[in-house]
Image (spheres, helix red, strand yellow):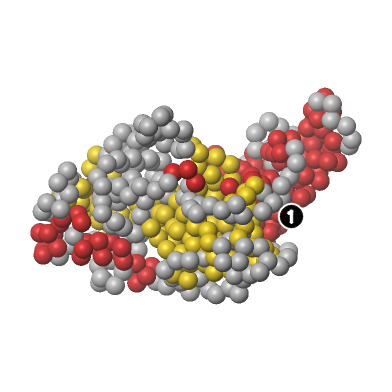
Amino acid sequence: MEEWQRSFLTLHQKLGVRRSDIYDRLDAELRTLWRITPDLQRDVDEVRRRIKDELEALFEEFLTTEDVPHRENVLLSLRLSYNILGEFEKDDLRIRQKKLANREGARGNTGNAESTIRDHVKDFRRYAVRAIERRLASLSPPNPQPLARALSPLGDDIQPPQTTGRRRGRTRVLFTGIALASALLVAIALVVVVLNRRSSSGIQPRGGGTGSASPTPVAAQEDLQIKSRIITLDDEPGSVMPGVYKPSPALERKILRQGGMQDPDLQRILQTSAVKLSNLSIQIDLKGLSRSPIRVTNIKAMTYRRLDPMNGTLFEIPTGQGIDPTVRLNLNLDKPQPLIRELIFPPQRGEELNLDPPKVGNPFFLNHVVSLKKSEDQTLIIESVTMQHYVEFGLELHYIANGQEKRVAINNEGRPFKVTGPRCGTTVGTYSYERAYTAQGNYSLLQEPNPDRMGVDEAGCGG
């Protein structure tokens, strides 16, 4: 058994996460995976908070993936067994389980409640070890490249993301309005799964495929065609060029004029070298190639790197390309274990357009399966979102063909997908960048005089 496994399997013993030596209890690999840095060694409360966040995410993934019945009871069993709620001060796990069993008995639950609770915990521990093992293996992405080279061919002044060493506040940036002619930007962090072209055998309630069709083919599969690309949706706030990028004098003259934010040279640079701010939308086109129906059962996010938000040159250029809002899905990359979830949009009010934001619903693949017959197409659009980090990640598509379960990695032409949250200033409601350009009403860009403390709307950076 590896050291990190021993470390994890003892987390629920004694006082669980309430134990005073919780930092020392964790193996170095788990600390790295869970972002528990050496500077937190004396901040026991923050260490506990991060461990609890990770455990809660594992609880949710376990209950969802394993389709566990009586979810609320099992979740309570797990929380109490690991002392997540801090309810017990005794250092004996059996005492906690007996008390929980007494509660179950008081509710009229029959059978050996204490034994059932122990089984829940054992099943979860087995599942969690496998899940953590996969995450540790995914920390090194396939075909890794130096970040600066992968980001851009523009020169040595483009640097990897700069970290500030302090945790950034949660931010939400809302932009409305300016209609842009087509895909201006290439990497913003809302990952939504939009399912176009529905058919009677397409998206079904749980029990029912996949296929592909798009500019970047994924490794060829004999039974399923998969293509992916980054797209631009409506209300995406902008992009960040890493490092100390400065437009050439000729390009800067063009972008500061009326219509400059639509300049083809600027669009090309942003599409090839910038990292999208807050939202990244990925389109996955699927096409069934097998005579037997294909069933897509899950798409998982594989996080390779999670750092502080990227510094550099901000291009705050909102987009206005609409898309059918009724079938989007969301991937929140700020969660320790991101799951693809449904987005529930408000109903329309007659002919009036309802601009209320959607609500994030249940994990999509908990209740749905995508099914594809031969030659049948299906498009998925995943909107990835981050407000707190710079994230590099990939996707893993799970499907069943001819009774065999298969997995396919999806990435950005052999490199990770990248997206960054906003870099907040020291003052509430401000951004802080090396340089910044913002869109104006005549489609020109304005260079911000104080990019290290530029104001954002009320929803941004704690405003």
- 384 versus 73 height, above or below: below
Q: Residues within 10 Å of mark 1 (few under 14, many from 20)?
A: few
Please report the residue visible at 68 percent of the width from the left and 66 percent of the height from the top.
292
Question: Which residue is more in the foreground, 243 or 9?
Answer: 243
Please report the residue visible at 64 percent of the width from the left and 59 percent of the height from the top.
295
Please report the residue visible at 62 percent of the width from the left and 43 percent of the height from the top.
56
Residue 194 position, x and y percent, is 48, 51
Residue 345 position, x and y percent, is 47, 37
Res 29 seen here:
no
Res 294 seen here:
yes
Q: Is residue 395 left or right of residue 59?
A: left
Q: Quadrant of the C terminus?
A: top left
The image quarter in which residue 419 lies: bottom left
Q: Which amino acid is tagged 1?
A: Arg
Please report the residue visible at 69 percent of the width from the left and 51 percent of the height from the top.
207
Question: Which residue is more in the foreground, 122 or 98?
Answer: 122
Q: Is residue 449 left or right of residue 234?
A: left
Please name the residue that numbered disc 1 is placed on: 126
